[in-house]
Image (spheres, rainbow, N blue to C red):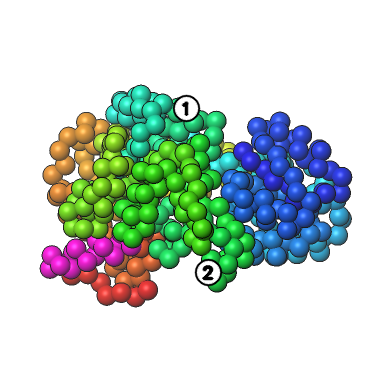
Amino acid sequence: MELLIVGTLDGQIGAASKIAISHGGHVSITETVEEGLAFLRSGKTIELVMIDVKLDIHTFISSLESERINALVVAAGVSTNPTLAVKAIKAGAKEYIPLPPDPEMIGAVLAAATRENHALIYGDKKTEEVLKLAKQVAPSEASILLTGESGTGKEIFSRFVHDNSKRANNKFVAVNCAAIPETLLESELFGYEKGAFTGAVARRIGKFEEASEGTLLLDEISEMDIKIQAKLLRAIQEKEIDRIGGKSPIKVNTRIIATSNRNLEAEVERGAFRQDLYYRLNVINIEIPSLKDRPNDIPVLAKHFVKKYSEMNDIGIKPLTEEAEKKLLSYLWPGNVRELENTIHRAVLVSTGEEIGEGAIILSHPNLVVNNQEAVSGGEFQLSTMADMERNLIIDTLKHTLGNRTNAANILGISIRTLRNKLKQYQDGGFDVPEANG
C-alpha cells in the first residue's frame, strides 16, 4: 500500500504516517501541490493521496484527471470549519479525515484503497491445477498469456504470478487496454516529454518505465490497435522504449503478462493481431476455466462475497440457505466471477430475515439455469453451443437496453469495442441485431 501525503497536515504528518505504516503502508511526503504532482508524474505508483485540506485540492485533482493519473484522494485537516471539508469533497476528495487521525478511520480508508477484491479465493480442483501451473512458471522471466472468458478473474491470477515471481518485491502495474482510447494508449504505455503534444504540460513516465524491474499487466491486449502492437513488440524484444517526443530510447527491464478473452490465433488469422507479437507473448499460456467449469469455487466465492459486502454495507453476515446455494450451482454464469459477485452483492442488500434465501438470488438470465446435477458434475449441457448462448445473451441484453451499446457492454462486462466486433460478426452471419441507440 503506497501512501502520499501532500502538505503539512498541521503537524500531524508523524501521527498519520505511523498509523499508515502500522497497517502495512509505505509513506512518501511532499509539501505542496506542485511537488505532489511532480512526484506522481515521475511514475511512482500511489494508491492513496492524503492532502492537507487547506491546499488547492481542486487544482490537484483536476491535474490528476487531465493527466490520467489514478489515485484515491482524501482530504485531512484539524480545522473545525465544516466549509473546508465540504469544499474538499466537492473538489473530488473521496473522504475527509479529521486530525489528529483516528487509527480505525485511516485503517478503513487504507483497506479500501488496497482493493481487497484481489484476494484469490477458490475451492475447485481445476482452479488448484491452474494455480499450480502459475506458481511453477512464475519464477521465470518468460512472458505469460492468460486466456479465458470475461469475468473469470484473469487480473487476479496475474497478480498471483507476480507475487510468486522473483519480482514480487517490485511493482505490479496494470493497464486495461480495452478501457483506454486508442489515441491515449500509446502515451499511457510509453510516456511523453513536455510539449510532445497539446496538453503535455510536463514529462510523464509511462507504464513500461514504471513497471521496470517489476511486472506489467496488459489486460485485454486483443483490444490494442495494431499500430501500437508494433511499438510494443520492439519494447519487448529490445527492452527499450521511446517516450512520445523523446530524443533517445530508454532501457527497461519489464516482465510482461497479457490477458485476452478472445482467441488470439483467430485474431492473427483475420489480421487484427500481429503474429510475431503473439509468439512473443504466448511463451507460456495459462487458460482460466469458466466459472461453470469449476463449480466447487461457486459456494466458496459466494460466502466470501457475502462477508465482503455485508461488512462494506454494515449489515450482519447471514448464511446462504441450501436452496440459495443450489440455485447458484444450477446457473451457467455467462459473466463468470464478476457476475457472481454482483449477484451476491445484490442478495446481501435485498435479503430479509436471518438467512439469504433463494428469493434473494436474482439471476440476470434465468433461462441459463440447468439441472443442478449437470452443473455440479460438469456434464454436457444440451441447451445449445456456447457460441449460440453468447450470441443470444448479447442480443437479449441489447434489446433490454433498447439498443444502447454502452449500457449493454457495461452489463455484459466487456469493452464497447469487443461488443461492436461481436455485433459485426452476427450481422455478417445474417442475424438480426437491434439498431444502435448510444
Res 159 seen here: yes
- Tell whether 428 sits left or right of 91: left
Crowding at dot 1, Cα within 10 Å, few <14 / some 14-19 / many 20+, comes out as: some
Mark 2 residue element: loop
Give the position of the N terminus as an image quadrant.
top right
Tell me residue 396's x, y (percent). Answer: 26, 62
Task: Please give the name of the residue rendered at 39% of the width and 31% of the height, measured from the top-left corner.
Answer: 141
The CA span between labels 2 and 1 is 38 Å
Figure check: 392 above or below 19: below
Is 79 covered by the magenta stretch? Answer: no
Figure check: 139 above or below 66: above
Q: Quadrant of residue 255?
A: top left
Give the position of the C terminus as an image quadrant.
bottom left
Figure check: 379 above or below 239: above
Q: Which is nearer the N-term, disc 2 or disc 1?
A: 1
Res 396 seen here: no
- Residue range of the region highlighted in magenta in the rendering: 417-431
Q: Where is mark 1, residue-wise? A: 166
Decide: marks 2, 1 in contact (CB < 8 A)? no
Figure check: 321 above or below 313: above
Is 427 covered by the magenta stretch? Answer: yes
Under mark 1, the amino acid is: Lys
Task: Please give the name of the residue rendered at 36% of the width and 49% of the height, measured from the top-left corner.
Answer: 234
Q: Where is mark 2, residue-wise? A: 197
Tell me residue 312's x, y (percent). Answer: 58, 44
